[in-house]
Image (cartoon, helix red, strand yellow):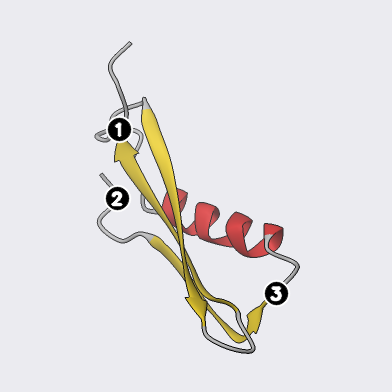
Amino acid sequence: MAPNPGKKNVQPPEKHQHTQHLNDVLADALSNWNPATDPPNVIFQFEATVSPNPGGVSQYRCRILPGPTP
């Protein structure tokens, strides 16, 4: 599977517009995915680091994990 998850640090922490950051880390994770050797059924796991007050997401992450076999 992808050796490096998609990851993006955000400063100042994001409070409202999360979609573009999630798209960015998904694209980053997919760029590390190899369709020739990695399984075709996968699970996308999105993670975030939430900062304390004033709050917001300071880091977005996406990992590609092996999914169930059909």
Q: CB under 8 Å between callouts 3 and 2?
A: no
Residue under numbered circle 2: 2
Q: Is residue 23 left or right of residue 40?
A: right
Mark 2: few/some/many CA within 10 Å (<14, 14-19, 20+) = some
In what element is the residue under mark 1?
loop
Among the two numbered marks 2 and 1 on one chain, the one whose residue lies closer to the N terminus: 2
Q: Amino acid at mark 3?
A: Lys
Q: Nearer the viewer, mark 2 or mark 1?
A: 2
Among the two numbered marks 3 and 2 on one chain, the one whose residue lies closer to the N terminus: 2
Of the pair 6 and 52, the residue shown nearer to us: 52
Q: Is residue 24 above or below residue 15?
A: above
CA separation in Å, label 3 and label 2: 28 Å
Q: Is residue 40 above or below residue 59?
A: above
**Residue 66 image position (x, y, % from top left):** 28, 34
Q: Residue at coordinates 53% horizontally, 54% vertically from top-left?
A: 27
Residue under numbered circle 3: 15
Can you tell which quarter of the image residue 43 is in?
A: top left
Q: Residue at coordinates 25% horizontally, 56% vertically from top-left?
A: 3
